[in-house]
């Protein structure tokens, strides 16, 4: 095991806390290529005297090139800010889950797993159940929301632009 700061930078930091001279928190690796390592000099969101240690590892090596690239999730049509749409969504899900016996089928598969009798046939049933649940969730979202899929993702720039637009609308001029 090798301490990441020593290996990557050739030395360890003076401190891993907000108090100088207290190198007490360590991260050690073995057989993992560390690309970057640093301390975050902020203690947010949790107030602590310990600084966060951040390491960047080569995921291709760590997972033997079997990991997918990181991607932003697709924007959702349904959000929790509309109680009426949420209630309609939950009601739709309950009906669909009862109609397709989702809970019962899931319980049978869990029982097979717990008793050690889980087979490839059960694995296929689990895959089918998973696909069906996904279809139900997406269908409920589509049916219960009036939002369009093509809204812009949130960003600080978009929030500022929206705020500025509100100021223009309220005052009749930029400001």
Image (tube, rainbow, N blue to C red):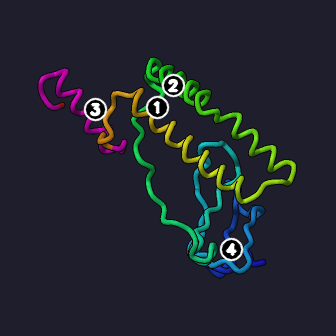
* For marks 1 and 2 on the same chain, the one whose residue lies earlier in the sequence: 2
Frontmost of labels 1 and 4 is 1
Q: Which mark is residue 140?
A: 1
Instruction: Tell me the residue at 23%/27% (across/down).
Output: 166
* Nearer mark to the viewer, of 4 and 2: 2
Please say if the residues under marks 4 and 2 sit with CB atoms less than 8 Å apart: no
Q: Earlier in the sequence, mark 3 or mark 4?
A: 4
Q: Nearer the viewer, mark 3 or mark 2?
A: 2
Residues packed near mark 3 inside 10 Å, few (<14), some (14 to 19) or many (20 plus): few
Q: Residues within 10 Å of mark 2 (few under 14, many from 20)?
A: some
Discs 1, 2 touching: Cβ within 8 Å: yes
70 falls in the magenta region: no
> Residue lying furthest right in this view?
115
Give the CA separation, mark 3 to mark 4.
44 Å
Is residue 161 highlighted in magenta?
A: yes
Q: Which residue is mark 4?
A: 4
**Which residues fall within the magenta stretch?**
153-174
Q: Earlier in the sequence, mark 4 or mark 2?
A: 4
Q: Position of residue 139 (x, y in %)?
A: 44, 35
Question: In x, y percent, where is residue 114?
Answer: 84, 48
In this rendering, is residue 100 above or below 31? above
Q: Looking at the figure, which quarter contains the N terminus?
A: bottom right
């Amino acid at each position: 095991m090798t301490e990441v700061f020593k290996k990557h930078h050739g030395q360890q930091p003076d401190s891993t806390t907000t108090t100088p001279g207290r190198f007490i928190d360590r991260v050690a690796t073995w057989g993992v290529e560390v690309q970057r390592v640093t301390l975050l000099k902020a203690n947010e969101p949790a107030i602590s005297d310990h600084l966060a240690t951040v390491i960047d590892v080569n995921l291709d090596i760590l997972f033997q090139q079997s990991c997918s690239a990181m991607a932003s999730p697709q924007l959702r049509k349904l959000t929790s800010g509309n109680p009426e749409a949420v209630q309609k969504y939950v009601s739709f899900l309950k009906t669909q889950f009862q109609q397709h016996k989702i809970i019962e089928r899931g319980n049978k598969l869990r029982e097979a797993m717990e008793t050690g009798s889980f087979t490839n046939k059960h694995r296929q049933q689990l895959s089918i159940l998973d696909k069906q649940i996904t279809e139900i969730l997406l269908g409920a979202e589509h049916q219960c929301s009036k939002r369009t899929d093509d809204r812009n993702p949130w960003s600080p720039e978009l929030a500022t632009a929206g705020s500025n637009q509100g100021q223009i609308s309220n005052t009749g001029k930029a400001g």
